[in-house]
Image (spheres, helix red, strand yellow):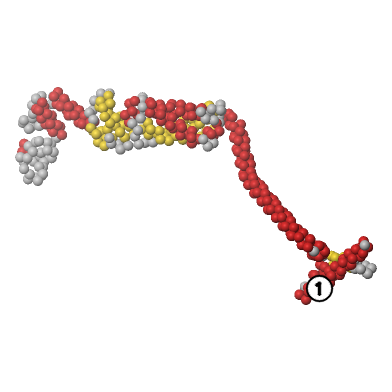
């Protein structure tokens, strides 16, 4: 049963420490006055510190709080403030660098940590965030050309103690070091690689040099990526520079076209030359072999000629006439006792005789004509022999 409900125990104390039986008439069921409760609390605190008397009569009257009570309240508030300030929360992305009386003491990991207020100071450092630095400057190249380079540096904090304590302003130091590294690399490179395909090499060399600077300065910075966002000529000479770049590109295009043409023509010419050499060698072998065969044939024929000169001579003549007739389509024959020469169109005779029987007849006529020619030759030879005798 609650202390202020009807029928409750009157001897119980209310939450403010008052005896409910001391109320006049015993029918006051509401909470006591707030001023009265505050006075009772101050009396108790004064009693603890010996600075005043408590309210013993319970009549609602008491002495006002003294100087000891004010000190007590101040002490309690100070104690609560110190407890509140001693609990420090470190985020998961951060590390806490603790300075004790201005000197480095320790590094706090993520989570709830305890620090001594007023004596220790915590410097939170974000070690996972990727930070960016932008640089845009006009620089002189190795071949004495001016180029405007735009650089982007991405970095993280690898050592929170060095980042917070070693250098007064590490990010500003990074800016100056990045500019110095870029100037060194650009000053060691010609303009053409910077404007074309050499940007990746330039960015990597700049990153390496910049990281060496950061390590030497003990800034606790890790340079992860360096990007060359742009490289262009100054705006005052941009048009002339564009013309030069266009001429360079045209030159490269012409060179590539010439090399492509050479690559297509040279192998073809070499193939033709090789084919001509092969044909010449084959013709040489053919002529030599034919000459050797003719020589062997002549030697064998000479042996037979010595045995029967007349027969061999006639045979050679007939073979020569046959080879001539075989390659000729028109034959003129002078027959003894005739007034006119006889013309034989062998091509038309052969074309008109398409059947087998016709071909046999034609071949018979040719054979007859051949015999007549041979007889005429023999008679002429006989007549000339007689005249010689």
Within-10-Å neighbours for mark 1: few <14, some 14–19, many 20+: few
Left-right relation of 54 to 242: left
Q: Quadrant of residue 301?
A: bottom right
- In the rendered image, which residue does mark 1 sit on? 364
Front position in the image: 298 or 202: 298
Query: What is the residue that sits farthest to the bottom in this orientation?
Result: 357
Residue found 56% across the figure and 28% down from its top: 143
Front position in the image: 129 or 89: 129
Front position in the image: 269 or 16: 269
Left-right relation of 23 to 182: left
Which structural element holds mark 1? Answer: helix
Left-right relation of 18 to 315: left
Residue found 7% across the figure and 32% down from its top: 58
Query: What is the residue that sits farthest to the right in this orientation?
Result: 339
Q: Quadrant of residue 11?
A: top left
Residue found 9% across the figure and 46% down from its top: 1
Left-right relation of 364 to 45: right
Question: Residue 105, how many percent across, how many down?
Answer: 26, 27
Question: Residue 20, how many percent across, how many down?
Answer: 7, 38
Question: Residue 120, how many percent across, how many down?
Answer: 25, 27
Quadrant containing the C terminus is bottom right
Residue 259, visible in the rendered structure? yes
Instruction: Please state the total of marks drawn on the protein image.
Output: 1
């Amino acid at each position: 049963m609650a202390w202020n409900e009807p029928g409750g125990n009157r001897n119980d104390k209310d939450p403010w420490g008052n005896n409910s039986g001391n109320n006049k008439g015993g029918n006051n069921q509401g909470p006591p006055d707030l001023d009265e409760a505050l006075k009772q609390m101050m009396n108790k605190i004064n009693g603890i510190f010996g600075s005043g008397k408590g309210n013993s009569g319970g009549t609602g009257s008491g002495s006002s709080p003294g100087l000891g009570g004010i000190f007590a309240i101040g002490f309690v508030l100070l104690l609560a403030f110190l407890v509140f300030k001693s609990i420090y929360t470190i985020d998961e992305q951060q590390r806490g660098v603790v300075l004790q009386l201005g000197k480095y003491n320790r590094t706090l990991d993520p989570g709830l940590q305890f620090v001594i207020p007023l004596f220790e100071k915590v410097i939170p450092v974000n070690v996972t965030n990727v930070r960016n630095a932008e640089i845009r400057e006009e620089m002189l190249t190795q071949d004495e050309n001016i180029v405007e380079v735009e650089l982007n540096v991405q970095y993280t904090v690898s050592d929170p103690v060095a980042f917070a304590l070693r250098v007064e302003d590490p990010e500003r130091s990074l800016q100056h070091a990045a500019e110095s590294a870029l100037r060194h690399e650009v000053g060691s490179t010609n303009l053409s690689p910077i404007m074309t395909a050499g940007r990746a090499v330039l960015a990597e060399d700049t990153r390496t040099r910049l990281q060496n600077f950061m390590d030497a300065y003990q800034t606790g910075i890790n340079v992860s990526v360096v990007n060359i966002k742009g490289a262009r000529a100054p705006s005052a000479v941009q048009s002339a520079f564009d013309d030069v770049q266009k001429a360079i590109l045209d030159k490269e295009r012409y060179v590539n076209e010439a090399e492509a043409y050479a690559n297509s023509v040279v192998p073809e010419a070499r193939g033709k030359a090789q084919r001509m050499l092969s044909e010449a060698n084959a013709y040489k072998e053919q002529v030599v072999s034919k000459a050797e065969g003719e020589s062997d044939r002549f030697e064998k024929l000479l042996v037979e000629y010595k045995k029967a000169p007349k027969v061999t001579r006639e045979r050679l003549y007939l073979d020569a006439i046959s080879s001539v007739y075989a390659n000729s389509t028109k034959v003129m024959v002078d027959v003894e006792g005739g007034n006119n020469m006889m013309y034989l169109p062998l091509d038309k005779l052969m074309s008109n005789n398409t059947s087998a029987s016709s071909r046999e007849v034609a071949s018979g006529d040719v054979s007859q004509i051949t015999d007549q020619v041979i007889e005429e030759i023999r008679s002429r030879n006989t007549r000339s022999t007689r005249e010689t005798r």
